[in-house]
Each structure stands twice: as structure tokens, then as C-alpha cells.
Image (cartoon, rainbow, N blue to C red):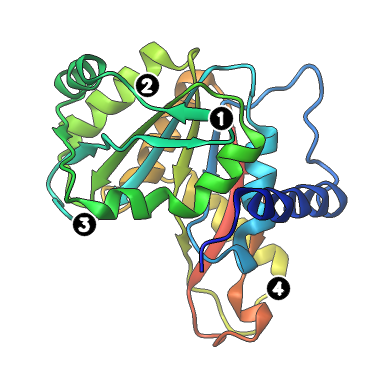
Amino acid sequence: MTLAPEVVAEQIMGYVVGASELIPTLKPSPKKSYSVAILPQGPHFYTGLLQAAGYLLLDNKKKKLLIISQQSDDTNHSIIDITTYGPIFGQTRKNSPSKIHKIAHTIGAQIGQPEQKSLYEQIRSQLPFIRTIMENKELLHISIGEKTPQNILNKIAGWIKNNREEYSIVILTNIEVNTPAKSKKIDEQNKIARIIQTVSSKTPLLTIFQKILTVQKKKPEIIAYVNPGDFGKPTSLTTRYICAVG
């Protein structure tokens, strides 16, 4: 069943209110702004508050939003999504074909094809938050293959470096962490912090996140995270949903 836009907006505002109440550090100070966030991919039951928090903390004065995800359609390449998102709430977010081709040439990416529905699926759960919270006029979505060569990742990071003043940036990835069954919450959080600060060929999205922060001379801040095991899921699960900003 597809919910009406007004119902979706009401649900998202519930997450916004909940995030504001549960996360004391949610509102950035006037001297601190965030341009990049790691946000999770998963059911809103687990991730809704984290997603709301991340979008609220991003600099909403920027008119462009860049989302970076990971795809399995072509594991050796990055792909630029050509989907037109909207219209909904009176706004359509798209990029001109000429702009898409120019960016693709610069970063060595493939142009997405209409049949590649997985690109849409990468950000489907994010769209209600984008539509309700963000005021960006443009949405650019780059999805990276797991085996994308390092030189392409460097090109993407370089392009972001040259254009970071124009974009708020969201990196969609969950964190895989192995901790003892009886580990303390603070120990697990410290381990997650080390993971998101580690550059590795096995985690291309986190590598790009690190490259962005290096340019900005910032360290990541973990706002909150969720262990699905705390909600009745098997405690052996290694997936963690996080909201981290920089």
C-alpha cells in the first residue's frame, strides 16, 4: 500500500520531533556546520531517528544534495543515477543530461540506465526525509561498485573537493562490527569510531568519507547508532546503523 504524501510527511515529522528529544546534540551551534553525514540504509523502525537527525544537522542553505551509495549492478564501476525524483510536495529534483554527462566524464563514471532499478532502491528509504526536511533544489546520486578502482575513487573524491561548497553530502552505508556478546556500549561505540576513521579498499564509501573530512580538516562525530540486537534481532548480527557527521 502506498501512503499519501501527507501521511508520509506526518510520519517523518514524528521522527524529527523524536530525534530532537532523544539526541541532545542534534542542533548544531552557530559556529559549527556539517557538510557530510553517514546515514544508514534500513527499515525506518530502526533508522528513522538517525536519518532525521542526519538531515537536520546538514547545512540546509546549500541548494544541492549529493548522495553516495553502493551498488551491485556493476561492481567495477561507479554509476550516476539519471532518475527524476518527483514531483512531490510541488518540487522535482533532477539534473540536466549535459550536466550528468560532464560529471560522469570528470569522475570516470557510467551513466545509469532506466532498467537499473536498484539505483532508485538505494535511496528510496531516504526520499521521505529529503522531501520533508531538505530544501535542496538538485539531487545528484552517485553509486559506487564494491570493486571500483582506487583511481576512480580518487577522481570522485577530487570532484567532491572542488565542489563541496555547493553540496550537502550524504553517504549511505551501514557499519559491520564484530564485538563480544557482552561488550560494553562504550567499547562498541569506540570500535565503530575507529572503523569510520579507517581508509580501506574494502570500504570504499568510508574511504570517500575520510577523504572529504581530510580536506575539511575535521574529525567525524558519531551522533547516535543502533544495534538491531537491542530490539529483539539475533545478537549475532554484526550490522550497525549509524548517524555520523563531519
Q: Amino acid at mark 4?
A: Lys
Real-space Cα separation, disc 1 to disc 3, in angstroms:
32 Å
The amino acid on which the numbered mark 3 sits, given as a three-letter code, is: Ser
The answer to whether residue 91 is visible is: yes
Residue type marked 1: Gly
Are circles 1 and 3 on residues that touch, CB within 8 Å?
A: no
**Mark 2 packing: few (<14 Cα in 10 Å), some, or many (20+)?**
many
* Circle 4 residue: 184
The reply, left or right, for residue 29 in relation to residue 130 is right
Q: Which of the 4 image quadrants contains residue 36? A: top right
Image spot of residue 72 (x, y percent): 21, 57
Q: Where residue 160 is drawn, which disc sits there?
A: 2
Which of the two marks, 1 or 3, is nearer to us in this view?
Answer: 1
Of residue 204 and residue 231, the one placed in the foreground of this image is 231
Gap in angstroms between the C-alphas marked 4 and 3? 34 Å
CA gap between label 4 and label 2 equals: 37 Å
Residue of label 3: 72
The first of marks 4 and 3 along the sequence is: 3
**Residue behind mark 1:** 90
Mark with earlier residue (1, 3): 3
Q: CA distance from mark 1 to mark 2?
A: 29 Å
SS under mark 2 = helix
- The reply to whether callout 1 and callout 2 are in contact (CB within 8 Å) is no
Residue 176 vertical position relative to residue 90 in the rendered view, above or below? below
- Corner quadrant of residue 43: bottom right
Q: Amino acid at mark 2?
A: Ile
Q: Earlier in the sequence, mark 2 or mark 3?
A: 3
Residue nearest the observer in this picture, 176 or 187? 176
> Nearer the observer, disc 4 or disc 3?
3
